[in-house]
């Protein structure tokens, strides 16, 4: 076959619902909402990076809302992706806030802080010996 007799790339492949023409594009905000949601959830679950996950989660929630609004436009898809990102981001924010509340409650409890201080002192004594 010569180059001129080969079918054009994508020729004969119908678009969405059997139509030919421009295909819909996924909203960038929806895709970023999903990425930020996953990153936020992973960060929050490591507990050490919980504050980063909280920040990423807030950004993901904002991008998810923007992605939902953009997905309502004609020729733009990504409603499911935006909802997934929004759910993951909101979950990360809730878990991050729960960790922050638990940590601050524990640190405001004097007996909890005293127990930590005793453990640190015991470890220091063990290292000195």
Image (tube, rainbow, N blue to C red):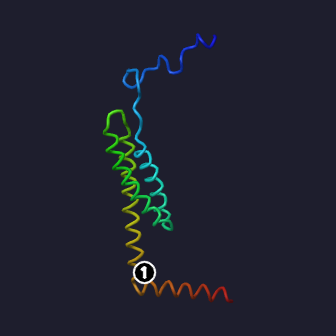
Q: Which image quarter holds the N terminus?
A: top right
Marks counted in the figure total: 1
* Residue 5 picture location, percent across and down: 58, 10
User: How packed is label 1: few (under 14 Cα within 10 Å), some, or many (20 or more)?
Assistant: some
Residue labelled with disc 1: 107
Q: Secondary structure at mark 1?
A: helix
| Residue at screen point 38% across, 21% down | 19
In this rendered view, identify the residue nearer to me: 101 or 16. 16
| 83 to the left or right of 45 | left
* Residue 61 picture location, percent across and down: 37, 54
In this rendered view, identify the residue nearer to me: 127 or 45. 45
User: Does 61 sit above or below residue 7?
Assistant: below
User: Does 87 sit above or below residue 11?
Assistant: below
Residue that sits furthest to the right in the current view: 129
Quarter where residue 124 is shown:
bottom right
User: Does 97 sit above or below residue 1?
Assistant: below
Q: Which image quarter holds the C terminus?
A: bottom right
| Residue at screen point 66% across, 85% down | 127
Quarter where residue 20 is shown:
top left
* Residue 76 picture location, percent across and down: 37, 36
| Residue at screen point 39% across, 55% down | 89
* Residue 59 picture location, percent across and down: 41, 56
In this rendered view, identify the residue nearer to me: 110 or 22. 22
């Amino acid at each position: 076959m010569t180059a001129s007799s080969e079918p054009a790339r994508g020729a004969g492949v119908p678009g969405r619902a059997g139509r030919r023409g421009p295909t819909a594009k996924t909203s960038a905000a929806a895709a970023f909402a999903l990425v930020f949601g996953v990153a936020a959830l992973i960060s929050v679950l490591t507990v050490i990076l919980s504050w980063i996950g909280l920040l990423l989660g807030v950004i993901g929630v904002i991008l998810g809302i923007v992605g939902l609004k953009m997905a309502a436009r004609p020729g733009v898809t990504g409603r499911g992706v935006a909802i997934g990102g929004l759910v993951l981001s909101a979950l990360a924010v809730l878990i991050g806030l729960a960790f922050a509340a638990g940590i601050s409650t524990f640190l405001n409890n004097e007996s909890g802080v005293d127990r930590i201080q005793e453990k640190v002192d015991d470890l220091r004594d063990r290292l000195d010996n």
